[in-house]
Image (cartoon, rainbow, N blue to C red):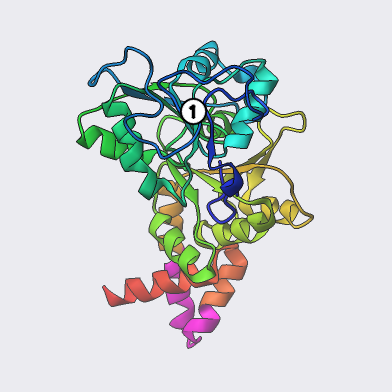
Amino acid sequence: MADPTNPSDDSTDDVTPAGSTVDGSPDDSDPPADRTPDGPAGPAHGVAPGARPGEGRIVLAATPIGNLSDASPRLVECMTTADVVAAEDTRRLLHLANALGVRVPGRLISYHEHNESHRIADLLRLVEDGATLLVVSDAGMPAVSDPGFRLVEAAVEAGLEVTAAPGPSAVLTALALSGLPTDRFTFEGFLPRKPGDRASRLADLAGERRTMVFFEAPHRLEPMLRALADAFGPARRAAVARELTKLHEEVRRGPLDELAEWASDGVRGEIAVVVAGSTAEEETDDVDHVAAVEQLMSTGMRLKDAVAAVAERDRVSKRELYAAVVAARGK
């Protein structure tokens, strides 16, 4: 669950030669004749012996989100047989290989959000020439809040084969542990950092009936939860899952206002936030709140004061209630 505002810096590890050991040091053996240890990605590089045009494919493989024991045998097989591995951070991929006790003989290429647009053409060319391309992110499934979508889109457009080696997912794990409805859900990724943009996005989700899953950086968790409480109401049920599958895994469940208060002490680790969807009862409550404001205004109270009084009494967002009253009066 990479934070797009804090990308990994693997500029010094842009390309790891084929034939490297898991710690990145050169192998004593000579590289295969069809692979050169450096140079641009292209038809002459990274293609397996005997591979023929039209036989290449892309494999999206999920990596552990915390517990290395969750690495699947199929992931290990892909790591040891792929001609080319496109990794969000090649150093982390090599650390994973080392921990799993496997060697990655294929050529490693960095592939992250800051270089994917100009990597795609070269990667597709390798696949067109018969190479098996393994795509991995730092944790979880590529293309889900991680690089990969644009490559898959381009591969589909080019008529190339794309498959997946499924595995760990922070989205599904957090959802399953949340205690909230799982039959219908939506993944919203990271919310915008700017308060205005964030409020606008949450306003669009105010009536969302499905359970929502978000990612957030630990240092922004408290303001994010308070923004959710403002948009959805402080009593909306939610869960904060951190360090999933790791030693200090924790899932906190409760109303948004209580979770925001808990987060004010500081939270560490990789975080997913799961929020219950809107209910018909909440929508009825919105109508009741508007009616309460209208009743107070009929006694001569100003709109602003009436909204403040009802919001404090019923523990709802003043801003959202004010907007609802204005919308109702405009109908």
| 274 or 280: nearer the viewer | 274
- 252, above or below 159, in the image: below
Residue 174: tell me if it is visible: yes
Q: Which residue is found at the position 59% from the left and 52% from the top?
A: 235
Residue 320's spot in the image, x, y percent? 47, 68
Residue 274's spot in the image, x, y percent? 55, 42
> Relative to 96, is 304 on the left or the right?
left
Residue 86's spot in the image, x, y percent? 46, 33
Three-letter amino acid code of the residue under disc 1: Arg
Prevalent SS, magenta region: helix
- 28, above or below 43, in the image: above
Q: Secondary structure at mark 1?
A: strand
Residue 122's spot in the image, x, y percent? 34, 39
Q: Which residue is mark 1?
A: 107
Residue 181: tell me if it is visible: no
Answer whether residue 294 is magenta in the image. yes
Answer whether residue 243 is magenta in the image. no
- 200, above or below 7, in the image: below
For the magenta stretch, what is the residue range?
Answer: 289-306
> Relative to 321, is 268 on the left or the right?
right
Q: Residues within 10 Å of mark 1 (few under 14, many from 20)?
A: many
